[in-house]
Amino acid sequence: MNENITIFDTTLRDGEQSPGATMNLREKIRLARQLESLGVDIIEAGFPAASNGDFEAVRAIAAEIKGCQVAGLCRAMPSDIDRAWEAIRHGAEPRLHTFIATSDIHMQYKLHKNEEQVLAMVQQAVSHAASLTSNVEFSAEDASRSRPEFLARVVELAISCGARVINIPDTVGYAQPQEFGALITYLLQHVPGSGQAVFSVHCHNDLGLAVANTLAALRAGARQAEVTLCGIGERAGNAALEELIMALDVRSDIYNLTTSIKKEQLYPSCRLLSMILGQPIPASKAVIGDNAFAHESGIHQDGILKHRQTYEIMTPEHIGRTTTDMVLGKHSGRHALKECLEGLGYRLSEANLDTVFAAFKKLADRKKEVVREDLEAVVLEEIFRLPDKYRLIYLSTMSGNMAIPTAVVKMEIDGEERQLAGFGEGPIDCIFNAISHLVEKQPELLRYSVNAITGGSDALGEVMVKLGQGEKTSVGRASDPDVLIASAKAYINALNRLAKKEEEERVCGRP
Ligand code: KIV
Ligand code: ZN
């Protein structure tokens, strides 16, 4: 008989801890809504005690999301737990997720605590959390490098104090599948009262084994998997939600496990995350990469034409990667646009719909067919953007093999218009030089990439720019049929994000 497992998504918490993955409040809420449509059971919305910004984001998500549980992470300290509870308590089914490290190396060097002291903290924290809600999850950080006998004592104590979910993280991605599966078996068999809790796993991908370790743990009896979209997360990331779901689906003959995930929402969810972060999905990424369903060699193409399953173990349609059936053009009206947006999961206010409609009309004038990806880009650009300190008003460039590359840029900076011409090695260099002179900042350009969102020479160019200034980095993105305009907008977007970080630091005092 098939058993159901719980999918705990931590894209908005562990995922957001990955470099360049910072999201603003509106982007977080949009992603949370998409996770709800995807069918995850729990959304870990953030770490409320980390900053006022995190607290507000978790509170807003808990208030907005009613179709699944919302969790807040907190260290095993009453003050952290109270702060997390304050943020989530008005949610539909709030979950407190408290953690402490249990490996010798973490206890000695990070916590400066011995085993007995850690046990005392577990007792105090879990009992306190359980006095606030029955929905308590406890994580033993660095569990895979902890002494198994001590880990078993910690887990037993956490369950006896009221934890109903016990999470076993492979925090540094050190475990190997067989070993990790055996650890779960050991805990299930040796911890008195293990039957009163659901065992969960949270695997990092430092050795590329996060999904394999998660699957091994599920086979051993874990019944909750902690995952992120596209596998984003600390360092090399976490187990990728889409890979886990498709492994369970394609090899259901081995696993016999079901989830409530709507598989046709997998690609749209990963795509939305990629657009929000301005990080293109790598072409060879399992399940969702552009090459995942591309067949290049003659032998493979021949096989596919004769019988798809010769070289395909799943179809693009399975994961919601349809060559779009929804095409709008310049004659499409506001009503058609509204329907399409609703189909994509965007419930916009009338004012926001007006804004998107105006931008859509402008785009449709320049581009024959406006497809799903174009529309998503327009919505993200127009609605989920940060209120801007800097705005592009005008851009004109000159380049070629017989011209000195020049860019003339006009911008609005804090409400005031300024204009400047810039020179450089090529048009992009000129544009970035002119903008940085106008805003009087000289950030380092850490990354620049251009990606065609859809096929065809009139495709929207999606540009991602990563800037660094001192300790801070920011990622900006923008799309436009003209890649030079998209580049200027992405650069300005990154500058706006840097300015926003400086502002947050000033107000909230968070480094
Ligand atoms: O990797 C980890 O151990 C974590 C815990 C806080 C669950 O993210
Ligand atoms: Zn983690």
Image: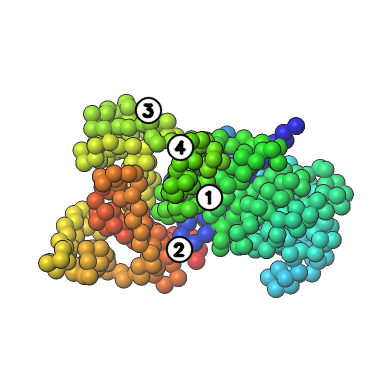
Disc marking residue 339: 3
What crowding class fits label 1: few (fewer than 14 Cα within 10 Å), some (14-19), or many (20 or more)?
Answer: some
Please give the residue where the numbered disc 2 appears in the rendered image: 505
> Looking at this view, is 410 or 332 the one in front?
332
Cα distance in 3D space between marks 4 and 1: 22 Å
Kind of residue sitting beneath label 2: Glu
In percent of width and height, residue 78 lies at 70, 56
- Classify mark 4: helix, strand or loop: helix
Mark 1 or mark 2, earlier in chain: 1
Cα distance in 3D space between marks 2 and 4: 57 Å
- Eye-nearest disc, 2 or 3: 3
- Eye-nearest disc, 1 or 2: 1
Cα distance in 3D space between marks 2 and 3: 40 Å
In the shown orientation, is residue 270 left or right of residue 222? left
Q: Residue at x 69, y 38 (%)?
A: 253
Mark 4 or mark 1, earlier in chain: 1
- Classify mark 3: helix, strand or loop: helix
Specify the quadrant of the image occupied by residue 333.
Answer: top left
User: In the rendered view, would you say 30 is above or below 171?
Assistant: above
Please give the residue where the numbered disc 4 appears in the rendered image: 305
Kind of residue sitting beneath label 3: Glu
Mark 2 or mark 3, earlier in chain: 3
> Looking at this view, is 279 or 347 the one in front?
279
Please give the residue where the numbered disc 1 appears in the rendered image: 286
Cα distance in 3D space between marks 3 and 4: 35 Å
- Eye-nearest disc, 4 or 1: 4
